[in-house]
Amino acid sequence: MEEKLQRKGQACTVGFFHKPRNYSRRALLLSIMRFDDIKSQKLFILLLDLKPEGINELKTALRLSPGTSQHDMDLPRNVLSDDEIHKVMQSLGGLSLNENVKVKEFLNRADSILQMAMSRLEEELVHILVQHKQYFEPEYVSFHSCQEDAVYDESFVSLEDETVEETSQRVSSGNVSGEYIVDLVHPRVIPDLKAIADVMFASNYDQEFCEVFIGVRKAALDEYFVILAMEKFSIEDVLKLKWSTLSSEIKKWNWAMKIIIQVYLASEKQLCYKILGEFGSVSSFCFVEIAKASLLCLLNFGEAITMGSIQLEKLFRLLDMYEVLNDLLVDIDDLLFEEVGSYVRIEFHELLRKLGHYARATFFELRSAIVSDTSLKPLPRGGIHPLTRYVMNYIKTLTIYDHTINMLLKDHDMDCSNPVAELENEQEISSVTSCALAFQLQLVTSALECNLVNKSKLYKEDALRHIFLLNNIHYMVQKVKNSDLRHFFGDEWIRKHNGKFQQHATSYQRATWSSVLSFLRVDSPGSCSILKTSPKERCKEFSIAFEEVYKNQTQWCISDPQLQEDLRIANLKVIHAYRTFLGITRISDKHIKYKVDDLEKLLLDFFEGSQRSLRSSHRR
């Protein structure tokens, strides 16, 4: 306690508090009435008795009876009028330390009494702030119940469409609308807090008041971080987190940023102004000191995110962070517009720039990852490749962030000689399909198509190669046609790619049935062609060829029901040719292994993804 009193007796040399200690006599009078220490009261009165001309005014003004304890914050103003205080101050003002040794002793005692009074007021300040603090938990603090997003990763693991459809509940859905101020301390104690500030500032104990006030309010803010389940990670801690944990922490960071800045700190700044607004820049100084540590903690988390390696699965979280911070910059600038908060304000602007750069680099990584994705073995059954699913679902999700991505890409130089530009030359380009994001998305799908063509070359059967490309291009078209991607690709792109998968369908049929149908050729009357085999032999060879096709293509896969049905209908031309052949050649039933109806049923087994056993319609 002695060390504390000695420290408080020294002149303050920190910041705007730099001024010598010069206690006002009014502050001494206000302070003495807060003690039930009668000895101290009498000692103080004795000090005033050294000037006889002031004693009558003082005795009349104080009227303190032994044992009286006065705690009402407004009581001093009622006991002493301004004129009476002025007379007492004049009376004390003539004291000289050189007049009498006792004078110096009494002044030292008075200084100790004042220090004790200020210590009591500090304790009261802490008590009021702690006992009457209030927290809020608005309805939009709901990140614990947010659905987990689909996880994209650089290995292009297949994603189920229905999962991706539900991806990314946008942080914007929880926006705090407008200014939302809450009472962080109960309103009824604000006058008491302000009165304590008035007394301590009048006694030149402004630094002590601010230290206590800042300390208690900082602790309250730290407690609110716990309520929000926000851990204060160091940069090193963040860099060590696994992606699943980090993704969850980023979501919490986004929510906490909105609540802390738009609600909590906005309310904290108003609280500081209500109590300290009459003391100029002190209010802003205290607010910045209260908020600085927590704001820097939030900044450090964002800074750590930008230091990580570029990985595609991070992009959506990065865009969320960028959007949240970009939306909050106006609020941050309003909270920290004074010079005392300029450092923190500038750091937030710098973090936004870094997040934008990191998100843009990650976005461009998508195309590079597609180009570099190679396969040593073909995808079994010729189905939709995981890469195709991944890329199309990925870019579909990107359209949610179209405004932000276009803003990040606006300064990026686009290579107009790229083949994608040729895709746009003949189409009527709207403001959406001609935006930077549309251009980049078409670059991505162009790279995907090239990759798929290379992967198709791994198949030995030409027909399966076309089934693979047919499946994947059809999937791409459906994704574009049935989502917001349509606005970025345009109807012309859809028409051209419809044509592409139809070409592959035609090529598939040619590769599958050309050799099979050759056995069903029949010479027309007057033809000079002489077939070397008899109709009976050709019918047998046709059956063998059909069985081989059946064996292979029942295990091939076409997952889209409509596309599967369309190809089966197209394959009916084989049935027509077979029926015609049997009608013309009039082969005996005992040489016919499959009837026409049998073949029609067998064609229904094609593209089911599992090999089937043949069912003979004729026993020999």
Image: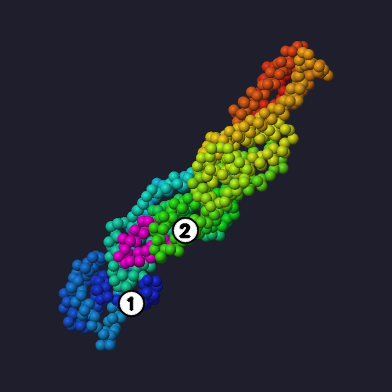
**Who's the residue at 74% across and 35% down the image?**
460
Residue 32: x and y, percent?
Answer: 25, 73
Q: Which residue is mark 1?
A: 21
For label 1, count other residues whose C-alpha is less than 10 Å away and answer few (under 14), some (14-19) or many (20+): some
Q: Which residues are magenta?
A: 265-292
Residue 445: x and y, percent?
Answer: 60, 41
Secondary structure of the residue carrying numbered label 1? loop
The answer to whether 52 is drawn above or below residue 289 in the figure is below
* Main secondary-structure element of the magenta-colored stretch: helix
Q: Which residue is mark 2?
A: 348
Is 483 inside the magenta-drawn segment?
no
Is 270 inside the magenta-drawn segment?
yes
Q: Sequence-wise, which precedes: disc 1 or disc 2?
A: 1
Residue 45, by quadrant, is bottom left
Residue 487: x and y, percent?
Answer: 52, 39
Observer-nearest residue: 205 or 546? 546
Measured Cα–Cα span from mark 1 to mark 2: 38 Å
Q: Is residue 394 left or right of residue 275?
A: right
Residue 290: x and y, percent?
Answer: 40, 62
Q: Is residue 70 visible?
A: yes
**Who's the residue at 28% across and 78% down the image?**
110
